C-alpha cells in the first residue's frame, strides 16, 4: 500500500474516532490520535492477520497496551473487516461490547487482550511470544505502550525478562507523545533517555517519527532482521495529531468535542460527509 493510501486511511480513522468520541461523550481523544499512524502501518503494512480467520494459531498478535486508546483500535479493526463499521454506533453504550477499553478476546474478533490497566500489555505479549517460540510457531507479537505507561514497574520487569530470554519475535512501540493524563511525562517521572533505557535493558531500540510511514515501516523491517533481541520502537508522536486545535494540547486527554468542533476537525482532515 502506498504512503498516500495509508495517509488516506489515517484521515478517515481520525475522523471516525473524533465523531465517536463526540457522540458517545467518551474521552482519550488525544491519546487515540497520537497512535493512529502506528496502527495504520501495522494493520495495513505489517500484521499477518485475516479477519475471516481471526483465531488462526499462526496469526501475528497485536496488543494495545495503552488500552484507553481503544476507539482507535476498534475503528482500525472495523476498517480491516473484523466487523461492520456500523457496530461502532454502539460505542460507549450500556450493555454493548464497545466499552472505553478493549474487552476480553472472546467478546470481539481481533482483540488479543483486555487492557486498560496500564502496564499489562507488554507482560501479556511477552507470554504470547514465548509461547509461540516454545510451540515452534512462526508469529510475531506487537504492542503499543504509552510513554506515561512506562512509569509502571511491570513494563520493566517484562522488558528485563524479554531480553534475558532473547525474545526476538516481540516488538513494542512506545507512543512517545510526551504527555500523560495530567501533565508532561517528563515532569511526572523523567524518562530521558527513553531509548537509552530500553537499550540498557538489552533491547534493540530505534527512534523514529511515529507519524512518518517510511520510518515506521523501515523500523519494522529492522525488527524482522533481529534474531537475538526484542525490539523497542520509540515513536516520537504528537498527542491529538491531525487536528490543529487538538495537537499537543493535553486538555484533549479528557475533553469531548462539540458538534462544531467535529465539523472543523473533519474539514481539516479533508473528510466530507
Ligand atoms: C494502572 C493504571 N493507572 C492509571 C490509569 C489511568 N490512566 C488512564 S490514561 C493515563 C495516562 C497514560 O499516559 P500515556 O501512557 O502517556 O498515554 P497517552 O494518553 O498520553 O497517550 C492514566 C494515568 C490506568 N488506566 N491504569
Image: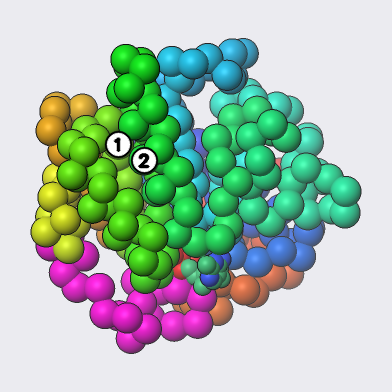
Q: Is residue 225 above or below residue 252?
A: above
Residue 68 pos. (x, y %):
58, 58
Q: Which circle marks residue 236 in the picture? A: none
Q: Residues within 10 Å of mark 2 (few under 14, many from 20)?
A: many
Q: Which residue is mark 1?
A: 170
Determine whether the residue tagged by mark 2 lies in a helix, strand or loop: helix
Quadrant where the C terminus sits is: top right
Between residue 261 and residue 156, name the one nearer to us: 156
| Residue occupying the point 56% across, 41% down | 113
Determine whether the residue tagged by mark 1 lies in a helix, strand or loop: strand
Residue 181 shown in magenta: yes
Kindly tell me whether mark 1's CB lies below 8 Å from ligand 1.
no
| Residue occupying the point 88% across, 48% down | 95
Q: Which residues are magenta?
A: 178-196
Can residue 179 be seen?
yes
Between residue 81 and residue 186, name the one nearer to us: 186
In the rendered view, how is the structure colored? Answer: rainbow
Can residue 213 be seen?
no
Residue 145 shown in magenta: no
Between residue 197 and residue 260, name the one nearer to us: 197
Residue 110 pos. (x, y %):
59, 30
Residue 106 pos. (x, y %):
69, 31
The answer to the question of whether label 2 and label 1 lie on touching residues, with beta carbons closer than 8 A, is yes
Q: Earlier in the sequence, mark 2 or mark 1?
A: 2
Q: Which residue is mark 2?
A: 126
Q: Is residue 255 above or below residue 13?
A: below
Tell me: 23 left or right of 62: right
User: Rounded to the nearest whole Å, what is the CA distance between mark 2 and mark 1?
Assistant: 7 Å
Amino acid at each position: 500500500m502506498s504512503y498516500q493510501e495509508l495517509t488516506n486511511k489515517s484521515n478517515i480513522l481520525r475522523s471516525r474516532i473524533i465523531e465517536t468520541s463526540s457522540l458517545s461523550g467518551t474521552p482519550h481523544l488525544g491519546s487515540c490520535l497520537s497512535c493512529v499512524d502506528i496502527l495504520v502501518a501495522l494493520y495495513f503494512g505489517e500484521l499477518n492477520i485475516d479477519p475471516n480467520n481471526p483465531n488462526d494459531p499462526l496469526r501475528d498478535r497485536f496488543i494495545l497496551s495503552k488500552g484507553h486508546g481503544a476507539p482507535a483500535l476498534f475503528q482500525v479493526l472495523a476498517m480491516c473487516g473484523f466487523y461492520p463499521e456500523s457496530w461502532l454506533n454502539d460505542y460507549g453504550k450500556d450493555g454493548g461490547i464497545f466499552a472505553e477499553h478493549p474487552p476480553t478476546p472472546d467478546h470481539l474478533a481481533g482483540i488479543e487482550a483486555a487492557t486498560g490497566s496500564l502496564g499489562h500489555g507488554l507482560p501479556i505479549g511477552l507470554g504470547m511470544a514465548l509461547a509461540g517460540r516454545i510451540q515452534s510457531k512462526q508469529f510475531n507479537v506487537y504492542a503499543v505502550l504509552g510513554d506515561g505507561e512506562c512509569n509502571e514497574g511491570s513494563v520493566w520487569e517484562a522488558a528485563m525478562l524479554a531480553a534475558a530470554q532473547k525474545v526476538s519475535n516481540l516488538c513494542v512501540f512506545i507512543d512517545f507523545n510526551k504527555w500523560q493524563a495530567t501533565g508532561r511525562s517528563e515532569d511526572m517521572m523523567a524518562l530521558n533517555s527513553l531509548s537509552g533505557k530500553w537499550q540498557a535493558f538489552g533491547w534493540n531500540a530505534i527512534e523514529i517519527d511515529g507519524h512518518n510511514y517510511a520510518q515506521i515501516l523501515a523500523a519494522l523491517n529492522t525488527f524482522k532482521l533481529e534474531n537475538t533481541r526484542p525490539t523497542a520502537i520509540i515513536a516520537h508522536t504528537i498527542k491529538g495529531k491531525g487536528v490543529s486545535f487538538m495537537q499537543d494540547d493535553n486538555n484533549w486527554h479528557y475533553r469531548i468535542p462539540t458538534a462544531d468542533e467535529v465539523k472543523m476537525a473533519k474539514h481539516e482532515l479533508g473528510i466530507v460527509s
